Image (cartoon, rainbow, N blue to C red):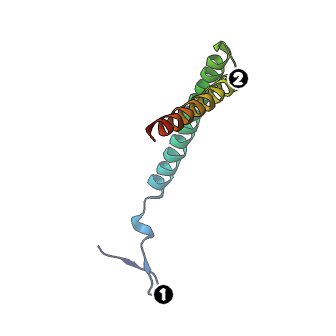
Amino acid sequence: MANHMDTDGKTNLSPYVDRRLIGASAALVTGGMLVCLAGTAIGTVAVVSACRRYLADLDEPPREMARRRWVQAKSATAAGVGAWQQHGRQAR
């Protein structure tokens, strides 16, 4: 590849770069990014609205469900520990 020499002896590659292609490339990349951002925003709105509808259709609020499950887990754990200790006493 031959380089173009300036009058001061420095190498200049600018005659080989088509600025119109660089500008078109930048415009297409910018447009693609804007389309991507718009698609992401639309998808986010769709997911958030679906989550809100799902939560609104629940018979019991998620906080109450979590609290009930926590109480169940604590009760099951206490029952398991009690059974394990009872089994240990019977084995002796």
Q: CA distance from mark 2 to mark 1?
A: 79 Å
> Depth check: 36 or 12 in front?
36
Mark 1 neighbour class, 10 Å CA radius: few under 14, some 14 to 19, many 20 or more = few
Q: Which residue is mark 1?
A: 8
Q: Which residue is mark 2?
A: 64
Q: Is residue 74 above or below residue 14?
A: above
Residue 36 position in % (x across, y down): 53, 38
Mark 1: which amino acid?
Asp
Q: Residue furthest bottom?
A: 8
Q: Is 80 left or right of 2, judged from the image as shown?
A: right
> Depth check: 52 or 71 in front?
71
Mark 2 neighbour class, 10 Å CA radius: few under 14, some 14 to 19, many 20 or more = few
Q: Quadrant of residue 2?
A: bottom left
- Quarter of the figure that contains the N terminus: bottom left
Residue 12 position in % (x across, y down): 44, 76
Which type of secondary structure does the marked residue at label 2 adopt? helix
Q: How many marks?
A: 2
Quick one: label 2 or label 1, which is nearer the N terminus?
A: 1
Query: Who's the residue at 48% across and 58% down the image?
Result: 19
Q: Nearer the viewer, mark 2 or mark 1?
A: 2
Residue 53 position in % (x across, y down): 64, 17
Query: Who's the residue at 54% across and 41% down the image?
Result: 31
> Depth check: 12 or 44 in front?
44
Query: Who's the residue at 55% across and 36% down the image?
Result: 81
Query: Who's the residue at 66% across and 24% down the image?
Result: 68
Q: Is 21 left or right of 49, judged from the image as shown?
A: left
Q: Are marks 2 and 1 in contact (CB under 8 Å)?
A: no
Q: Is residue 41 above or below residue 49?
A: below
Which type of secondary structure does the marked residue at label 1 adopt? loop
> Depth check: 44 or 28 in front?
44
What is the number of the mark on residue 76? none
Q: Residue furthest left?
A: 1
